[in-house]
């Protein structure tokens, strides 16, 4: 669920809310399903860092200069938890971070870097 597809000709990105079982086409060719890269991947400096903050979380993306530059920036940061999706869109000039409220330990964070693709992580389980 919520797969990200990219057209490698025009650059269109699409989020698949429900898979109808057919091919996803753009510019007369198949769109590429983006794989999520996470902890343990070589050069993992884009894995989102998640810190608990109040009733939510703060997400940072290391490995990207702040403020971000037009040729290397995080386009969005998202959090999913159950049926809830929260997304913060970002632009060059922004800081590669976002805060989300009402997020629990069962959530999942993904970030998309224009240059280096899709990265994901999950909050650490509370100790105790
Ligand atoms: Fe990057």
Image (cartoon, helix red, strand yellow):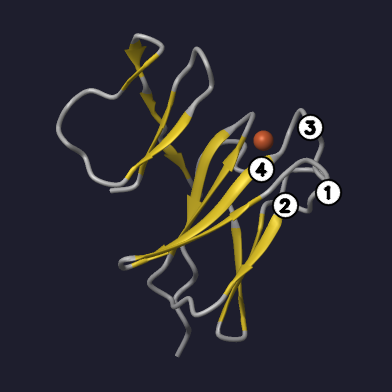
What residue is shown with label 3?
70
Which mark is nearer the camera, 2 or 3? Answer: 3
- Using a 10 Å C-alpha cutoff, classify the residue at mark 1 as few (fewer than 14 neighbours), some (14 to 19) or many (20 or more): some
Residue 126, compared with residue 40, is above or below; it is below
Rate crowding at label 3 as few (under 14), some (14 to 19) or many (20 or more) other CA atoms within 10 Å. Answer: few
* Residue 110 picture location, percent across and down: 50, 51
Label 2: element kind: loop
How many numbered callouts?
4
- Mark 2–mark 3 Cα distance, whole angstroms, equals 13 Å
Residue assigned mark 1: 66
Do the CB atoms of the residues marked 4 and 3 lie less than 8 Å apart?
A: no
CB atoms at circles 1 and 4 under 8 Å apart?
Answer: no
**Quick one: label 2 or label 4, which is nearer the N terminus?**
4
First in sequence: mark 2 vs mark 3 = 3
User: Could you tell whether 121 is left or right of 83 in the image?
Assistant: right
Which structural element holds mark 1? loop
Task: Report, in whole angstroms, how far the alpha carbon at label 3 lies from the one at label 1.
Answer: 11 Å
* Residue hosting label 4: 74
Residue occupying the far top of the picture: 28
Identify the residue shown where x is 55% and y is 77%.
101
Q: Pointer 2 and pointer 4: residues touching (CB < 8 Å)?
A: yes
User: Position of 36 compared to 112: left or right?
Assistant: left
Whether the residue under disc 4 has CB within 8 Å of ligand 1: yes
In the displayed structure image, the side of residue 123 where residue 65 appears, left or right: right
Picture coordinates of residue 125, whole percent (x, y): 44, 76
**Location of residue 41 in the rendering, given as x and y in whole percent from the top left corner:** 51, 40
Instruction: Give how far apart the Cα atoms at labels 2 and 4 are.
Output: 6 Å
Question: Looking at the image, which residue is at 23% across and 45% down?
Answer: 18
Q: Which mark is residue 21?
A: none
Q: Which residue position is annotated with label 2?
A: 96
- Residue 73 image-quadrant placement: top right
């Amino acid at each position: 669920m919520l797969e990200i597809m990219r057209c490698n000709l025009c650059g269109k990105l699409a989020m698949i809310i429900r898979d109808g079982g057919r091919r996803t086409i753009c510019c007369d060719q198949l769109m590429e399903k983006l794989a999520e890269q996470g902890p343990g991947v070589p050069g993992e400096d884009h894995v989102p860092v998640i810190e608990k903050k109040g009733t939510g979380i703060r997400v940072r993306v290391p490995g990207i200069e702040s403020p971000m530059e037009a040729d290397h920036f995080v386009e969005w940061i998202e959090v999913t938890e159950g049926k809830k999706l929260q997304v913060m869109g970002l632009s060059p000039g922004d800081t590669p971070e976002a805060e989300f409220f009402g997020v629990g330990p069962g959530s999942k964070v993904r970030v998309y870097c224009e240059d280096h693709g899709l990265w994901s992580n999950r909050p650490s389980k509370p100790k105790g």
